[in-house]
Image (cartoon, rainbow, N blue to C red):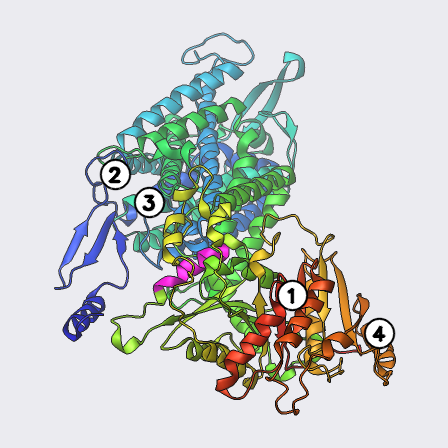
């Protein structure tokens, strides 16, 4: 307890502490008490100084790489392929569909990127911080693979363009002029490897060199584009003979022509004409052509992937991406119309590099193709390396990605670049651009669907902190984006799509099993909260009906070390109802600087996780246990989910056993188990240290007999059912690893009030409640095959033989209640004769020791082998002076029995009609 002055000072210190820490530009900003800002930079993975500050603006950091990535190889090398096979109308439809999908995704990207500070990792960072580590990690890895495959695809396209100019003639196989490069599968792989090595060198130098090259390359590509448009007006019609190597190494010749702007050519190219693709020797279709065309749309994340190098990513990403997409859309539409009106279908289908043939100076197009393809490959490699580095830094996949955390002094993740280069080297063994186009497109569509899902989840969760400055989106656009991506995935290639979804699910399961630690927040928790609140409002207590009754339990726990078996047993008894572990911390908040209960929740929740029970935890601070229990009985739960049953451990002088010393989950016998913590900072040693040792014989009792009986009395007054559990530390087989099914167990039920022999009512509320609880236990997984026995106590020597009629009535009742149990008749004349003949008012407390001993002996005789016993709990005395007598009677009756549950029910729980 602190003096008043120190208390106020501590409170004021807490008020001056920051609400959150913000990591911007790799720095952790902390506000000192005086208001000064202190920058602390984390060490890099290599132990080098802090990273270089971000310095890329919207144009150079987002627009330039996005435009170049979207032009890539499709603009110069596959425009004719798309228009030739699909025709102008279907080609434009493909462009509209593709841009419609990416526009919906861009809206989601803009919303997420303007909702907080973005670090390195681009799409992965957005998804993981929105959806949590499992979904973010799995989609991030698949997005990394998509970038790797795209890098290989762009390199193969570049090699194809190089061989179109410098490759030896396919017909003569003889070097002529500049055509000196031999062609063939292994030659293609060799050239691709050399180009990949060039990309590797540039990416190892760093993003600043890459961004400086980008603007120069954009200028060259722009000049190439202008040359194409000018050539369509300046170049006169031309005829060509195109040769390809057909089946059996036979040379096939095609007559093609460039007509200039011609209405007839335009009309002929309006419709589709799907035919054989000379590069893969397979017949094209709408899906295969769209897959190739969509690779031009995979560049929308080029700017977002550079988020770690952008000066203001939350401003640059939305603005730069939207402008770049609008620009490329206009260029593609103009290009499609241009080639449809000037080139016949044969030229478009049989020569993917036809733009060089019809240019006023062919090197213009050659330079544009080389620059665009080379930059797109570098963009994919550097983007993939950033994603992999972010995955490695977050430790989602453990040791395999650990080296990828290593960076240079300037922050360039060179090991991640090497990883990416090695995998891209494997991709180029495909040999042809069109062979990997479908796989690249499917991976990208899945990543885009995940981004839309992330935005949709944030929107549906309605979290107050989701306040993006970009407002042009809604859950409709997110949902439409998800559906569009998934539909087009399966239209393009059902096999690749199914395989990618299966891979995603496997990664999800792997990350869920690893349970990676994160402090990012889980969107699932926000969604669950939103739905639970909605359904709790619908759960109207006024519509409760007895036929849908289920136990909703508040179990008061003083020390979990001695109560674990009871906690596990009650978990079987809840039957899908509410289960709350309650604990009262003694104290007065007025005399304390802060609430001591708040920091205890993590320890109790970790205990719940280790025991494997489905329970909530509710703790309170109170001057007395009785008052604290009253608080919990009143305020625990919400709406229609509030406890209707209070369960207490038995009050006796037995020395409790320490369950933590018996269970390997707590004593840490496994190697390394003692230091392994959960995701919330609670390891086994701290969990053990938090809960005090079990009570010894000489230990002070924090609860008096009068207070204990008062708790029972309070619960009954509050119309709560009460159960007292004794000897449950003897119960075995309740743990989550136990395979017990109850086939060797017996449940014994004694529905009569054994302390009042004159009462023969087996159908009062308390007796029926006792039967219901036994039946509920018999329905649980570990007690499903247990045998239930119900004992009826009768006085056979009495002149009144009404017990025979009572037995038949009781059998009929069990039949109506659908309770499967065997009935045992127990004569107890010898027990009753020990009962005192005091007046009715005194019978509840004036019981002789002989009678109590006789009742105990009867129970021992018939129920000694039972796994658990259910006994009738008499109503507690109204006078506090009789509390000790009441407890002594209960202790005497249950002495040495084994696991026993004394039950007093006050609410009707059985129903015989439909």
Which label lies toward us, 1 or 2?
Answer: 1
Residue designated by label 2: 44
Q: CA distance from mark 3 to mark 2?
A: 14 Å
Residue designated by label 4: 811
Residue designated by label 1: 575
> Percent from the top left, x then y, of residue 64?
33, 43
Which label lies toward us, 3 or 4?
Answer: 4
Query: Of 894 and 445, which appears nearest the observer?
Result: 894
Task: Name the residue rendered at 55%, 58% in the picture.
Answer: 729
Instruction: Tell me where residue 903 sits by quadrant.
Output: bottom right
Q: Is residue 754 left or right of residue 29?
A: right
In primary-sequence order, the first of circles 4 and 1 is: 1
In primary-sequence order, the first of circles 3 and 1 is: 3
> Percent from the top left, x then y, of residue 327?
40, 48
Query: Of 429 and 53, which appears nearest the observer?
Result: 53
- Secondary structure, mark 4, is helix
Instruction: Tell me where residue 290 sits by quadrant.
Output: top right
Q: CA distance from mark 2 to mark 4?
A: 76 Å
Magenta span covers which residues? 599-609
Query: Of 278 and 255, which appears nearest the observer?
Result: 278
């Amino acid at each position: 307890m602190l003096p008043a002055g120190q208390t106020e000072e501590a409170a004021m210190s807490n008020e001056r502490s920051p609400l959150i820490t913000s990591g911007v530009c790799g720095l952790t900003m902390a506000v000192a008490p005086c208001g000064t800002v202190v920058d602390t930079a984390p060490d890099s993975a290599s132990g080098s100084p802090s990273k270089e500050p971000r310095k890329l603006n919207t144009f150079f950091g987002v627009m330039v790489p996005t435009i170049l990535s979207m032009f890539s190889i499709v603009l110069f090398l596959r425009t004719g392929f798309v228009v030739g096979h699909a025709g102008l109308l279907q080609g434009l439809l493909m462009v509209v569909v593709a841009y419609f999908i990416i526009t919906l995704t861009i809206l989601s990207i803009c919303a997420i990127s303007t909702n907080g500070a973005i670090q390195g990792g681009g799409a992965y960072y957005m998804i993981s911080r929105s959806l949590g580590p499992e979904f973010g990690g799995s989609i991030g890895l698949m997005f990394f693979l998509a970038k790797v495959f795209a890098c290989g695809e762009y390199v193969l396209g570049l090699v194809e363009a190089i061989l179109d100019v410098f490759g030896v003639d396919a017909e003569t196989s003889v070097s002529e002029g500049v055509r000196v490069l031999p062609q063939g599968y292994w030659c293609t792989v060799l050239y691709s490897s050399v180009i990949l090595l060039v990309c590797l060198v540039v990416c190892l130098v760093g993003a600043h060199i890459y961004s400086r090259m980008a603007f120069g390359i954009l200028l060259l590509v722009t000049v190439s584009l202008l040359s194409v448009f000018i050539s369509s007006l300046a170049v006169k019609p031309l005829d060509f003979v195109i040769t390809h190597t057909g089946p059996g190494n036979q040379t096939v010749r095609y007559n093609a022509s460039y007509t200039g702007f011609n209405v007839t050519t335009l009309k002929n190219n309006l419709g589709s004409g799907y035919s054989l693709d000379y590069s893969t020797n397979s017949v094209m279709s709408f899906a295969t052509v769209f897959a190739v065309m969509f690779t031009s749309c995979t560049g929308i994340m080029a700017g977002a992937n550079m988020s770690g190098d952008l000066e203001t990513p939350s401003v640059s990403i939305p603005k730069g991406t939207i402008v770049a997409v609008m620009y490329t859309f206009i260029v593609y539409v103009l290009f499609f119309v241009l080639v449809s009106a000037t080139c016949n279908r044969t030229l478009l289908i049989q020569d993917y590099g036809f733009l060089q043939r019809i240019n006023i100076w062919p090197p213009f197009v050659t330079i544009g193709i080389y620059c665009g393809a080379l930059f797109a490959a570098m963009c994919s490699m550097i983007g993939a390396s950033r994603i992999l580095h972010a995955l490695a830094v977050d430790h989602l996949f453990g040791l395999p990605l650990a080296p990828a955390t290593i960076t240079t002094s300037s922050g360039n993740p060179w090991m991640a670049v090497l990883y990416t280069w090695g995998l891209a080297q494997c991709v180029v063994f495909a040999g042809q651009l069109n062979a990997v186009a479908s796989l690249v497109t499917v991976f990208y569509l899945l990543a885009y669907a995940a981004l839309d899902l992330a935005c949709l989840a944030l929107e549906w969760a309605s979290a107050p902190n989701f306040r993006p400055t970009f407002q042009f989106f809604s859950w409709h656009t997110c949902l439409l984006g998800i559906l569009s991506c998934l539909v087009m995935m399966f239209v393009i290639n059902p096999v690749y799509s199914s395989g990618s979804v299966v891979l995603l699910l496997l990664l999800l399961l792997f990350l869920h099993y690893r349970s990676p630690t994160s402090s990012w927040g889980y969107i699932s928790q926000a969604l669950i909260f939103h739905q639970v609140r909605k359904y709790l409002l619908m759960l109207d207590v006024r519509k409760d009906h007895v036929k849908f009754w289920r136990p909703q339990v508040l179990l008061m726990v003083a020390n979990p070390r001695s109560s674990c078996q009871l906690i596990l047993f009650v978990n079987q008894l809840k039957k899908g109802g509410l289960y709350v572990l309650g604990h009262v911390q003694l104290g007065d908040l007025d005399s304390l600087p802060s609430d001591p209960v708040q920091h205890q929740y993590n320890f109790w929740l970790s205990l719940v996780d280790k025991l494997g029970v489905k329970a909530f935890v509710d703790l309170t601070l109170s001057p007395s246990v009785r008052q604290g229990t009253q608080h919990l009985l009143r305020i625990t739960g919400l709406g229609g989910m509030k406890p209707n049953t209070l369960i207490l451990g038995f009050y006796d002088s037995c020395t409790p056993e320490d369950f933590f010393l018996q269970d390997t989950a707590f004593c840490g016998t496994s190697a390394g188990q003692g230091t392994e913590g959960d995701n919330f900072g609670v390891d086994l040693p701290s969990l053990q240290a938090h809960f005090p040792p079990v009570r010894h014989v000489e230990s002070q009792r924090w609860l008096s007999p009068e207070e204990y009986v008062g708790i029972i009395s309070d619960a009954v007054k509050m119309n709560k059912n009460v159960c007292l559990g004794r000897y449950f530390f003897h119960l075995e087989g309740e743990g989550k690893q136990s395979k017990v099914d109850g086939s060797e167990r017996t449940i014994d039920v004694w529905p009569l009030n054994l302390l009042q022999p004159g009462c023969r009512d087996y159908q009062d509320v308390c007796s029926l409640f006792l039967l219901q609880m036994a039946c509920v236990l018999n329905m649980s997984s570990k007690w499903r095959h247990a045998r239930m026995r119900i004992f009826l106590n009768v006085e056979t020597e009495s002149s009144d033989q009404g017990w025979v009629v009572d037995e038949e009535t009781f059998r009929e009742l069990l039949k109506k209640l659908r309770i499967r149990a065997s009935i045992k008749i127990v004569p107890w004349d010898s027990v009753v004769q020990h009962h005192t003949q005091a007046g009715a008012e005194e019978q509840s407390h004036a019981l002789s020791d002989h009678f109590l001993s006789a009742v105990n002996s009867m129970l021992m005789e018939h129920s000694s082998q039972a796994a658990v016993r259910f006994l009738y709990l008499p109503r507690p005395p109204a006078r506090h002076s009789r509390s000790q007598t009441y407890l002594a009677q209960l202790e005497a009756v249950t002495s040495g029995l084994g696991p026993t549950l004394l039950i007093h029910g006050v609410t009707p729980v059985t129903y015989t009609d439909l």
